[in-house]
Image: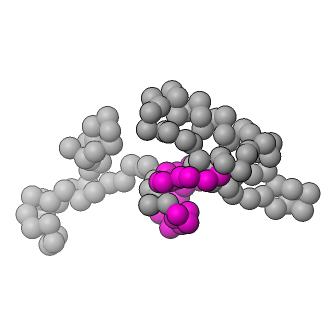
């Protein structure tokens, strides 16, 4: 996970990527507790060196700043990174004819989504 660090006396902050060890063995509450613990200690400059090594995959949520798209950078030595952007409602064109040509029967709608955010 990535942690934004507070600005120093020069107004420069930073970003570090501490590792939550054995995250696959934790339930959602356990992951939330680990994230809060690591983030708090990172901002207080209390992380150990081993808490910055050994990660395999990073999740990042750049959507909290309103961005829908960014290019996250894979941490050296990790297998990959998953970036999640902002979620927003946007209208789509519903067409009863060809989806590539305008039709008199076309209309705008907000698509229905299930509880996981998947379009129905």
- Furthest-left residue in view? 97
Is residue 85 something that shows in the picture? no
Please indicate whether residue 72 sits to the left or right of residue 12 in the image: left
Of residues 2 and 18, the one drawn nearer to the viewer in this rendering: 18
* Chain part drawn in magenta: 52-77
State how many labels appear: 0
Of residues 118 and 83, the one drawn nearer to the viewer in this rendering: 83
Is residue 1 something that shows in the picture? yes
Q: Which residue corresponds to the image point at 65% horizontal and 46% vertical from the top-left?
A: 51
- Position of residue 17 relative to residue 98, above or below, is above
Please indicate whether residue 92 sits to the left or right of residue 59 in the image: left
Q: Which residue corresponds to the image point at 49% horizontal and 60% vertical from the top-left?
A: 78
Q: Quadrant of the C terminus?
A: top left
- Position of residue 39 relative to residue 82, above or below, is above
Q: Is residue 58 magenta?
A: yes
Q: Which residue corresponds to the image point at 60% horizontal and 38% vertical from the top-left?
A: 35
* Residue 14 horizontal/vertical position (percent): 74, 59
State which quadrant residue 62 falls in.
bottom right
State which quadrant residue 76 falls in.
bottom right
- Position of residue 89 relative to residue 115, above or below, is below
* Residue 53 horizontal/vertical position (percent): 61, 53
Please indicate whether residue 47 sits to the left or right of residue 109 in the image: right
* Residue 3 horizontal/vertical position (percent): 66, 49
Of residues 74 and 111, the one drawn nearer to the viewer in this rendering: 74
- Position of residue 57 relative to residue 21, above or below, is below
Q: Is residue 50 magenta?
A: no
Magenta: main secondary structure: loop
Q: Which residue corresponds to the image point at 32% horizontal and 39% vertical from the top-left?
A: 116
* Residue 106 horizontal/vertical position (percent): 17, 60
- Furthest-right residue in view? 9
Please indicate whether residue 37 sits to the left or right of residue 110 in the image: right
The type of colouring in the image is: one colour
């Amino acid at each position: 996970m990535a942690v934004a660090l507070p600005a120093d006396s020069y107004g420069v902050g930073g970003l570090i990527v501490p590792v939550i060890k054995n995250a696959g063995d934790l339930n959602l509450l356990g992951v939330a507790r680990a994230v809060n613990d690591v983030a708090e200690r990172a901002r207080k400059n209390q992380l150990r060196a081993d808490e910055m090594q050994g990660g395999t995959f990073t999740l990042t949520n750049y959507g909290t700043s309103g961005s829908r798209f960014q290019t996250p950078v894979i941490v050296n030595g990790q297998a990959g990174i998953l970036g999640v952007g902002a979620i927003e409602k946007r209208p789509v064109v519903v067409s009863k004819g060809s989806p590539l040509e305008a039709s008199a029967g076309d209309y705008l709608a907000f698509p229905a989504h299930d509880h996981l955010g998947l379009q129905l």
